[in-house]
Every structure is written in C-alpha cells, then in structure tokens.
C-alpha cells in the first residue's frame, strides 16, 4: 500500500504545480483540477497517516535512546500503543479508498424518477376511473421527498372494473428526462402495478402444504447481514408490459406489440382502450384456441 500512497502524493504534487502554470489551457486546467479534487480526500488521510507515523517513529527512537529509564519507557510504551491504535483509522480508510470501485457509484440514481412516475400512473388510473364512472377511493399513499409516490393503493368499484384493469398488472417502464436532472439526460425507470379483484366474503382455510414461498438473497458485498437474510425482492425487467417513451411521444404494449403515438392521450386516459380492446381480443382468441384443442 505504501507504494500506492507515495504515487498519490507525487501525482497530487504534480497536479498542484500544473494548475499553477500560466500556460495551461482551460481544458487542461479543468481536467487537472477535477483529478486533484478526487485526490483531496485521500491526501487528507495520507497527511493524517504521516503525522501518526512520525509520532510513532519519534516514540520508538525515544525508547531506543533511554533503555534504562523505566519511567520514561513506561510512558513511551503507553503513548506508542495509543499512537498505533490511532494509526489504524487512516490506514483502514485509505485501504478502502484504494479498492477498485464501481464506475456507476458516482452517478445519480433514478429512485426519485420512479416515484414521480408512480404518482403519474396512479393519477392516470384515477382519471380513467372518473371517465368510466367508477368510484375511486384512495386507500394509502406514501410520498417521497419530491412529493412523488413511493407506494400508493386505491379501491376502485363499478361495473366491469376488474375486467378492464386486470391487464394493467405488471411492470410499467418510463423513459424521459426527470425534473431532477438538470443535464437533460434521458433516464429509464419502472414502477410495478398490481390489480387484484376484490374477494368475496368466504371462509378461507389456508394450509401450510398449500403455500409456496420464494425468497431471494441479495448479491454483492452489501451491508450487514445482506447476504445471510432473505431480504431481496425478485423482479425481472423482461416482465415489463408497457413502456412510456416521453421523448418520442409513444407508448408500447409489449404483450400485443402495439405502439400508440400519442403519449399525452394515454396519460390523460383518452383512447386508452386501444390496448384494452387488443388484450381482450387476444384473451378471447387464446380461450378459443384452448377450447378447440381440448375438443
């Protein structure tokens, strides 16, 4: 590790000298300054480590010079043990900083975009319910920091509700520029929609042998107990049913292969039955095929 630390010190000194040269171009200056900022935390730790090491060397030198002074040796030994313990902190932090990292670690994540899209989807179903004359009751909403929805649930009642909405269950993917991204980059994120029919009041007896429970353990280094507990959620991007591409103004239903080039109409739930009608037709054709093969 010492060789790496010396290399960082030399590189930092070189960059410090370079950015102070008047002949450096703006592009070169910006690049060097950016690299220097990345090294700053490591240099602070190296400086702390060098101070500890200097103290340790001084104590050891003192002990070598006074081998017969018991009081001095006792005090120096105590200080040395303390200094060696203090040395571990910058050493451990530097060792961690030298480990190869994930290139994506410094990028923004899209959690907020997913929560904002979840709010859009929830309100889309609310508008659709009103257009159909259904009753839409909000059951629960958990908001994110940007006033999106981390999760939301509603009870919808009316004629033929489940028959129309059952095809909405699945992964809805969105591609657009989030309001939180000032650079204008397009992000992809997704929300999960579950449509469940309201159960009748029946006597349910659930036996252990009737249950199937799938659990998954997260991969990677993770945090404490991350790989020893069944704490991961299983999801597959291939399960997506629809993609909302805002830059291109289109919505694609991957189950029937239909693309509708009027995304605003879909979000406002205008002409949205184009997907439902196609899915109902496919369901009927599948049912007919199954019935015919059984004859």
Image: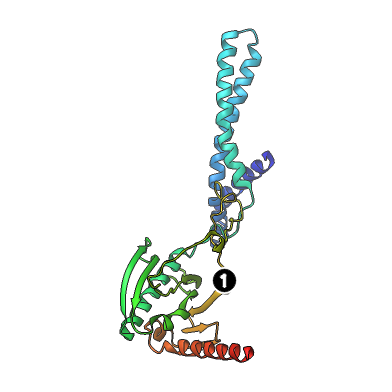
Left or right for 77, reference 113: right
Q: Identify the residue at image location x=38%, y=62%.
A: 144
Q: The C terminus is located in which quarter?
A: bottom right
Position above or below: 271 against 236: below
* Figure coloring: rainbow
In this view, the residue in front, 143 or 194, is: 194
* Quarter location, residue 163: bottom left
* Rendering coords of residue 151 (x, y %): 40, 65
Regarding residue 181, the answer to whether it shows in the image is no
In this view, the residue in front, 22 or 42, is: 42
Q: Identify the residue at image location x=54%, y=89%.
A: 282
The residue that disc 1 covers is: 237
Q: The N terminus is located in which quarter?
A: top right
Numbered disc total = 1
Q: Residues within 10 Å of mark 1 (few under 14, many from 20)?
A: few
Position above or below: 152 against 40: below
In this view, the residue in front, 209 or 43, is: 209
Q: Identify the residue at image location x=55%, y=86%.
A: 256
* Rendering coords of residue 191 (x, y %): 47, 70
Badge 1 marks a residue whose secondary structure is helix
Regarding residue 92, the answer to whether it shows in the image is yes
* Quarter location, residue 201: bottom left
* Rendering coords of residue 51 (x, y %): 56, 31
* Rendering coords of residue 292 (x, y %): 61, 92
Left or right for 100, reference 155: right
């Amino acid at each position: 590790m010492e060789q790496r630390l010396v290399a960082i010190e030399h590189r930092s000194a070189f960059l410090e000298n370079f950015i102070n040269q008047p002949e450096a171009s703006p592009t070169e200056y910006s690049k060097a300054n950016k690299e220097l900022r990345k090294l700053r935390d490591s240099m602070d730790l190296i400086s702390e480590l060098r101070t500890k090491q200097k103290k340790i060397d001084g104590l050891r030198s003192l002990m070598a010079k006074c081998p017969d002074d018991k009081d001095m040796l006792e005090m120096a030994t105590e200080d040395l043990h303390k200094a060696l313990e203090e040395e571990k902190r910058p050493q451990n932090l530097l060792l961690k900083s030298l480990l190869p990292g994930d290139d994506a670690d410094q990028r923004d994540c899209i959690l907020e975009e997913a929560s904002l899209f979840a709010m859009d989807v929830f309100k889309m179903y609310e508008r659709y319910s009103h257009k159909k004359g259904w009753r839409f009751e909000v059951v629960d909403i958990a908001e994110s920091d940007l006033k999106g929805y981390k999760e939301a649930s509603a009870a919808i009642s009316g004629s033929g509700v489940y028959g129309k909405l059952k095809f909405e269950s699945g992964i809805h993917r969105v591609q657009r520029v989030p309001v939180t991204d000032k650079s204008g980059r397009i992000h992809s994120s997704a929300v999960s929609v579950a449509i469940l029919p309201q159960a009748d009041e029946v006597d349910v007896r659930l036996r252990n042998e009737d249950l199937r429970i799938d659990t998954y353990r997260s991969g990677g280094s993770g945090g404490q107990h991350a790989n020893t507990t069944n704490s991961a959620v299983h999801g597959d991007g291939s399960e997506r049913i629809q993609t909302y591409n805002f830059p291109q103004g289109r919505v694609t239903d991957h189950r029937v292969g239909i693309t509708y080039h009027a995304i605003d109409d879909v979000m406002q739930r205008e002409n949205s039955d184009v997907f439902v009608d196609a899915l109902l037709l496919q369901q009927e054709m599948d049912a007919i095929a199954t019935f015919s093969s059984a004859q």
